[in-house]
Image (cartoon, rainbow, N blue to C red):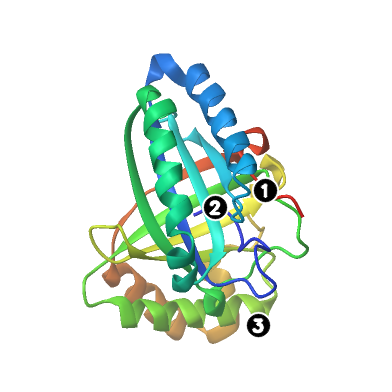
C-alpha cells in the first residue's frame, strides 16, 4: 500500500507482493534485530527483488510492519518461487517466533487513476486509506474514480496520490488510496476542499452525482499511517 513501483526492472510491472506482519508487543526490538539479519541474508543469497519495510505510525495496531516488493508481473512470481521457499524456511526458523500473525496480498498499481509525486525520491511517510467496495460496484467505482482523477488534473488541485487495487488476499473488492510524503507537513490539505474542486471542474450537479456514486459503492473505510524503515529494508546490489 506504500510506495511507487520500484525500479526493480527496466520496465517495472504493476504488481506488488505485500506481507503484513503483526509483532508481539514484548518482542519488537528482537523482531527488528532478526529482520535486519534476515535482510542481510537476502543479500548473501543475491535476491534480485527489492523489499521495502514500513512500520505503523498511527492506527489500531502499532505493532504492524508491512514488507513489500513492487514492480512485478505474474511471471516474476514464478521466477522467484525457489527464492521464496528458502526465504520462508529461514523466516520460520529465525523471525517467526517474535510475531503473532502474518498475512499477504497482491496489489495492482492503478496508473490510470493515480497522480504520483514527481521525482524518484523514497517517501518517508505514507497515509493509507483502504476502501471496501460493494461487490458488483467495481465498475461504478472505476468510473467515478477516473472522473475525480480528471477533475484533479483539470483544476491542478495540489495533491498527489496512488491507488492500489487488491487482487488477491482480501475478503472482498478493495481499493487503497495512498498519499506519500517526505514529512508530516506534506499531508496538510489544500486550501480548496474536495467538493469545491469537483464543482469547479464539472459544476454542482455532476459533482453531487459523483459523490453519490462513491457513497453508494464504498461500504467501508479505514485509515493508518506508516513510516518507511530503510534500516529494515533490502535493495539488491547494482
Q: Is residue 174 visible?
A: yes
Q: Is residue 188 visible?
A: no
- Residue 40 position within the rendered picture, expressed as x and y whole percent measured from the top left: 62, 35
- Residue 4 position within the rendered picture, expressed as x and y whole percent measured from the top left: 61, 61
| Label pair 2/3, CB-CB below 8 angstroms | no
- Residue 20 position within the rendered picture, expressed as x and y whole percent measured from the top left: 40, 43
Near-viewer residue (113 or 201): 113
Near-viewer residue (11 or 183): 11
Q: Residue, x 42% and y 58% (percent of image)?
A: 81
Quadrant location, the C terminus: bottom right
Near-viewer residue (207 or 12): 12
Element class at badge 1: loop
Q: Residue, x 54% and y 33% (percent of image)?
A: 38
Of tags 1 and 2, the one toward the viewer is: 1
Judging by the rendered image, the residue that carries numbered circle 3 is: 154
| Label pair 1/2, CB-CB below 8 angstroms | no
Q: Residues within 10 Å of mark 3 (few under 14, many from 20)?
A: some
Judging by the rendered image, the residue that carries numbered circle 1 is: 235
Spatial separation of the CA atoms under disc 3 and disc 1: 37 Å
Mark closer to the chain start, 3 or 1: 3
Task: Determine which of the numbered discs, if any, sits on residue 153 in the image.
Answer: none
Spatial separation of the CA atoms under disc 2 and disc 3: 26 Å
Judging by the rendered image, the residue that carries numbered circle 2 is: 2
Query: Is 192 left, or right, of 74 in this rendering?
Result: right
Amino acid at each position: 500500500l506504500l510506495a511507487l513501483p520500484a525500479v526493480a526492472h527496466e520496465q517495472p510491472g504493476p504488481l506488488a507482493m505485500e506481507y503484513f506482519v503483526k509483532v508481539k508487543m514484548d518482542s519488537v526490538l528482537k523482531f527488528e534485530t532478526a529482520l535486519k539479519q534476515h535482510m542481510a541474508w537476502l543479500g548473501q543469497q543475491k535476491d534480485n527483488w527489492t523489499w521495502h519495510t514500513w512500520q505503523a505510525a498511527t492506527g489500531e495496531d502499532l505493532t504492524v510492519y508491512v514488507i513489500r516488493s513492487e514492480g512485478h508481473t505474474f511471471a516474476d512470481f514464478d521466477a522467484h518461487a525457489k527464492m521464496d521457499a528458502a526465504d520462508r524456511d529461514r523466516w520460520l526458523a529465525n523471525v517467526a517466533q517474535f510475531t503473532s500473525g502474518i498475512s499477504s496480498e497482491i496489489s495492482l498499481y492503478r496508473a490510470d487513476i493515480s497522480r504520483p509525486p514527481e521525482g524518484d525520491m523514497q517517501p518517508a511517510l505514507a497515509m493509507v486509506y483502504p476502501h471496501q467496495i460493494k461487490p458488483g460496484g467495481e465498475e461504478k467505482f472505476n468510473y467515478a474514480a477516473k472522473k475525480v482523477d480528471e477533475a484533479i488534473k483539470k483544476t491542478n488541485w495540489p495533491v498527489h496520490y496512488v491507488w492500489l487495487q487488491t487482487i488477491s488476499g482480501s475478503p472482498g473488492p478493495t481499493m487503497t488510496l495512498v498519499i506519500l510524503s517526505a514529512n508530516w507537513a506534506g499531508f496538510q490539505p489544500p486550501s480548496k476542499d474536495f467538493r469545491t474542486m469537483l464543482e469547479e471542474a464539472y459544476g454542482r450537479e455532476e459533482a453531487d452525482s459523483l459523490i453519490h456514486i462513491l457513497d453508494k459503492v464504498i461500504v467501508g473505510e479505514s485509515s493508518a499511517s506508516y513510516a518507511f524503515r530503510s534500516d529494515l529494508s533490502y535493495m539488491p546490489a547494482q
